[in-house]
Image (tube, coloured by chain):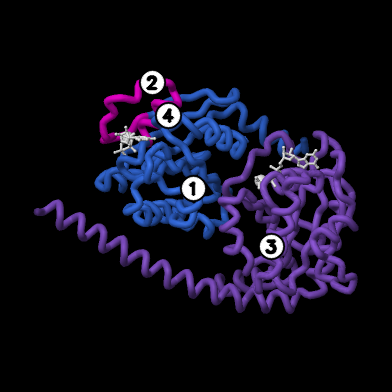
């Protein structure tokens, strides 16, 4: 390993990672967070404010902030942007009608100065549903290919059966290491 | 006045250090991300399949080089074309020891190289994973890819092993290959820059129209929802 990456690793190791979990209402953010912390995923209500949980993954402490996605709450997202190490954006893959809308919200996030160069993971959630759109179509729908200033990754997943979630978190940890 | 002189300074600086962009292509598992890690001297163990985009900027000779590394999986390859217009050259990586994938690697190669936006741009082809048994040498890979015209200076094929042990140096073939690529870009720099400018302008225009159409559709959808909620 090069000296630079070693230094980077040492520097980051003693720090906790701050991860933002954003996306439209009903995308499945809270369900994903609960699933990752092995909690009961039944009876989840729409989030009015935020939830925060600390997960340990691969020796890293990840503080994940899940913020409500309803339209009236979205203006408050920006209060959470400081010191973000990674952004996870969650999509309801079965909600074809709102794909472009969620893409526009994401584009606004990516324009935020405080989030510049922050790695982006897109969880294409609810893949267990029959009408789920594929990860590739989502990448196109969200215009991910217009991003140049940061690394991004799209991960198909289902918070319901847990598939894909760990792969996504593994990518996050490697991206910010 | 201050901004003017600052802009002037930036402009001069930009003229001196040429900024170029290089695209890493190749089907999944070829070793693109590993190559990028090798160039950065980063841990090769940190590599996972790419379902998206990585980027890295480094200084090489008189250039500031930005690499774009894309996912090569069948279902993500579709995004590649979006990057063709803006790059100065490309590196096509092949897992030359994987008999099963060589066909896909070949047809994908032919398809990209036919794209108008990549034409006249230099391409370095890496016959990767030479440490594995059955890896093709440069001549065999050239034949497989149909690069048998020796006059063609657009392509350069070389063997390499992108995956190295932590702490050991980058394969010298990779270094030499990249030197070739930078030389080829340098020789054709003005021509490539002009091509990029024209094709980027076209792409931007197209994207602008698409964005506007999208915005209208979203507005309409929101309006419909609002009306429904009022009823
Ligand atoms: N079928 C299926 N349903 C899911 C999945 N993930 C979440 N859901 C359901 O989607 C609904 C919304 O999930 P939440 O986790 O509350 O969504 P949220 O993104 O936190 O929504 P807000 O808090 O309003 O922003 C719930 O009924 C979940 O059970 C999934 O992977 N598959
Ligand atoms: N033996 C050997 N393995 C290699 C070499 N280069 C890469 N690999 C391995 O090949 C696998 C795929 O490498 P990646 O760099 O992820 O391949 P990629 O082209 O980025 O693949 P996608 O991101 O899926 O498009 C990894 O397990 C690497 O360790 C090499 O020179 N020799
Ligand atoms: Mg919620
Ligand atoms: Mg890769």
Q: Mark 2 points at which residue?
A: A39
Please identify, in this view, whether the residue under mark 4 or under mark 3 is nearer the observer: 4
* Marks 3 and 1, how far apart at CA: 27 Å
Crowding at mark 1 (Cα within 10 Å: few <14, some 14-19, many 20+): many
Both marks 3 and 2 on one chain: no
Q: Mark 1 points at which residue?
A: A135
* Marks 3 and 2, how far apart at CA: 46 Å
Of residues A129 and B194, the one nearer the viewer is A129
- Dot 4: chain letter: A
- Dot 3: chain letter: B
Asked if labels 3 and 4 touch by Cβ distance under 8 angstroms, the answer is no
Q: Colour of chain A?
A: blue
Q: Colour of chain B?
A: purple
Q: Name the residue under label 4.
A: A161
Comes first in the chain, label 2 or label 4: 2
Residue at the (30%, 42%) spot, across then down = A25
**Label 2 C-beta lies within 8 Å of the nearest ligand 1 atom:** no
Count of picture labels: 4
- Dot 1: chain letter: A
- Tell whether position A31 is magenta: yes
> Taking B104 as reference, is B139 left or right?
right
Q: Name the residue under label 3.
A: B21
Please state, as top left, top right, bottom left or bottom right, where the C terminus of chain B lies in the image.
bottom left
């Amino acid at each position: 390993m090069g000296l630079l990456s070693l230094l980077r690793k040492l520097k980051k190791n003693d720090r906790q990672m701050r991860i933002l979990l954003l996306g439209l209402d009903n995308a499945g953010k809270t369900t994903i967070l609960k699933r990752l912390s092995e909690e009961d995923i039944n009876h989840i209500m729409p989030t009015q404010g935020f939830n925060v949980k600390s997960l340990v993954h691969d020796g890293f402490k990840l503080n994940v902030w899940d913020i409500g996605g309803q339209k009236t709450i979205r203006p408050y997202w920006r209060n959470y942007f400081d010191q973000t190490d990674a952004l996870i954006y969650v999509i309801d893959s079965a909600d074809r009608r709102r794909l472009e809308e969620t893409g526009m919200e994401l584009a606004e996030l990516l324009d935020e100065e405080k989030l510049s160069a922050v790695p982006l993971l897109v969880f294409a959630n609810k893949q267990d549903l029959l009408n789920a759109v594929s990860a590739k179509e989502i990448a196109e729908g969200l215009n991910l290919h217009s991003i140049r200033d940061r690394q991004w990754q799209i991960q198909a997943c289902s918070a319901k059966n847990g598939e894909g979630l760990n792969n996504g978190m593994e990518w996050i940890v490697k991206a910010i290491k | 006045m201050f901004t003017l002189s600052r802009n002037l300074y930036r402009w001069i600086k930009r003229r001196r250090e040429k900024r170029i962009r290089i695209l890493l292509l190749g089907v999944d598992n070829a070793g693109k991300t590993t190559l990028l890690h090798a160039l950065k001297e980063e841990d090769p163990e940190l590599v996972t399949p790419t379902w998206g985009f990585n980027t890295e900027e480094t200084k090489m000779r008189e250039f500031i080089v930005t690499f774009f590394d894309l996912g090569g999986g069948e279902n993500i390859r579709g995004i590649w074309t979006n990057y063709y217009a803006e790059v100065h050259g490309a590196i096509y990586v092949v897992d030359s020891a994987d008999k099963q994938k060589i066909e896909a690697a070949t047809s994908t190669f032919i398809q990209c190289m036919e794209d108008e936006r990549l034409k006249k741009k230099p391409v370095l082809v890496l016959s990767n994973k030479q440490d594995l048994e059955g890896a093709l040498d440069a001549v065999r890979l050239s034949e497989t890819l149909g690069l048998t015209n020796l006059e063609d200076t657009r392509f350069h094929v070389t063997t390499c092993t992108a995956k190295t042990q932590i702490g050991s140096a980058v394969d010298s073939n990779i270094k030499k290959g990249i030197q070739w690529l930078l030389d080829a870009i340098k020789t054709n720099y003005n021509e490539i820059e002009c091509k990029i400018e024209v094709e980027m302008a076209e792409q931007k225009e197209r994207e602008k129209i698409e964005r506007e159409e999208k915005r209208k559709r979203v507005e309409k959808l929101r309006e419909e929802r609002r009306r429904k909620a009022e009823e």
